[in-house]
Amino acid sequence: MGSDEKLLDCLIVGGGPAGLTAALYLARLRRNFVLIDSGAQRAAWIPKSHNIPVFASGISGPDLLARQRDTLAQYGVAPTIGTVSGLRRQPDRFVAVTEGEGGSRQISARYVLLATGGVDIEPDLPDLPNAIQRGLVRYCPICDGYESRDRRIAVIGYGDRGLGEAIFIARTYSRDVTLLTLGQPLEKPLRRQGELDALGVKVVEAPVERLDLEGDRIAALHAGGKELHFDVLYSALGLKYRSDLALSLDAEHDPSGGLIVDGHCQTSVKGLYAAGDIVRGLDQIVVAMGHAAMAAIHIHNRCELPTEDEPDGA
Ligand SMILES: Cc1cc2nc3c(=O)[nH]c(=O)nc-3n(C[C@H](O)[C@H](O)[C@H](O)COP(=O)(O)OP(=O)(O)OC[C@H]3O[C@@H](n4cnc5c(N)ncnc54)[C@H](O)[C@@H]3O)c2cc1C
């Protein structure tokens, strides 16, 4: 295995909106760092986002990522293509194992920022793999519910998460909302029955037997002997977090693997930071960028402390 001799100030893992923002901050703070990215950003699936404040006509995920990489190039920084497959902590540094074109390498850094994101849990619809990635089912009403206002909306989900999202959409965007549980029975009596009734949310617990596709949209769903028509479908099944590296160091996390961080986006492992979707909370681009800025500044300020205090100290 190859080994990089020099000790970096920081290793950034992940080149989505969070990791690329952290890289911009660290470049401008004149830090010595490397960004490793395996190139599977959730952001790349965004057809067009309208809730990133500076793009009045919206921007696609690939365009946003390309602009972030172009900005970094002005500082002579480019992501290294590869995957960080292991992370160890030593008293004064982290040692990462990376897999890339040239085989395995070891990288040592005083700090590590994880910006590895997550993967959408796809709904189990008949003969329709990757429905979210293909844009047939949407995942985030906060992102694009506004564009679906007053339309016929279905929410795929169960348990409290499914109920919560159906109620959120009915309260905010449309009075024609149906919760599809894909054959999973809801616990009775329903916890939020009063709100569902008040907002007119319908619930279909029958499994979906068949779908009719028409071009790039789902024209009809067949469930419980009925043909159902919606303008928009949302999945409320959540994310599988790519937090394995942090979990291998016993970082504190919630039951689904979302990392718990402090006000500087530092995990419970000193010197290990996290930004973006991997952090428990709101999965949004501006939030991911905010995490990254806070983490990068804290890392920079701690680099000025005596080496013996890092990363174990304070
Ligand atoms: C269809 C869709 C539409 C969306 N629309 C919007 C919207 O309109 N507005 C909005 O704010 N948000 C939207 N989002 C959410 C948004 O995409 C995420 O919040 C955002 O991408 C999070 O950025 P991130 O940097 O944390 O993660 P990601 O974008 O997922 O990037 C993580 C990167 O880390 C890399 N990585 C993972 N593990 C490793 C490893 N071990 N080694 C090296 N690299 C690794 C991955 O390959 C990936 O490149 C949408 C998401 C989807 C799926």
Image (cartoon, helix red, strand yellow):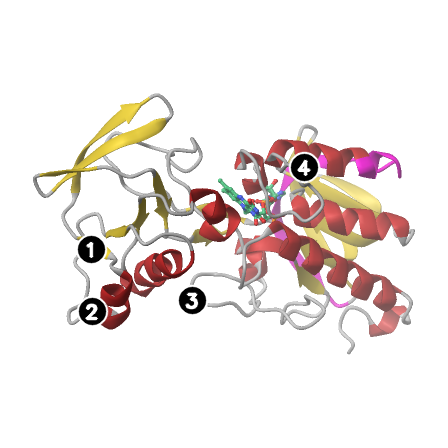
The residue carrying mark 1 is 203
Q: Check if mark 1's residue and mark 2's residue have beta carbons within 8 Å.
A: yes
Q: Residues within 10 Å of mark 1 (few under 14, many from 20)?
A: some
Judged by depth in the image, the label closer to the viewer, 2 or 3, is 2
Identify residue type, mark 1: Val
Q: Which of marks 1 and 4 is in front?
A: 1
Q: What residue type is labelled 3?
A: Pro
- x and y, in percent, of residue 149 in the image: 42, 47
Pointer 2 and pointer 3: residues touching (CB < 8 Å)?
A: no
Q: Distance between the residues labelled 2 and 3?
A: 23 Å
Please state the extent of the stretch shown in magenta in the rendering.
71-91
Earlier in the chain: of badge 2 and badge 3, it is 2
- Mark 2 lies on residue: 190
Instruction: Judge whether residue 80 is colored magenta.
Output: yes
The local secondary structure at tag 3 comes to loop
Gap in Å between the C-alphas at discs 1 and 2? 11 Å
Q: Is residue 174 magenta?
A: no
Between the residue at mark 4 and the residue at mark 2, the CA separation in whole angstroms equals 41 Å
* Helix, strand or loop at mark 4: helix
Q: Dot 3: within a 10 Å radius of its alpha carbon, few (fewer than 14), some, or many (20 or more) residues?
A: few
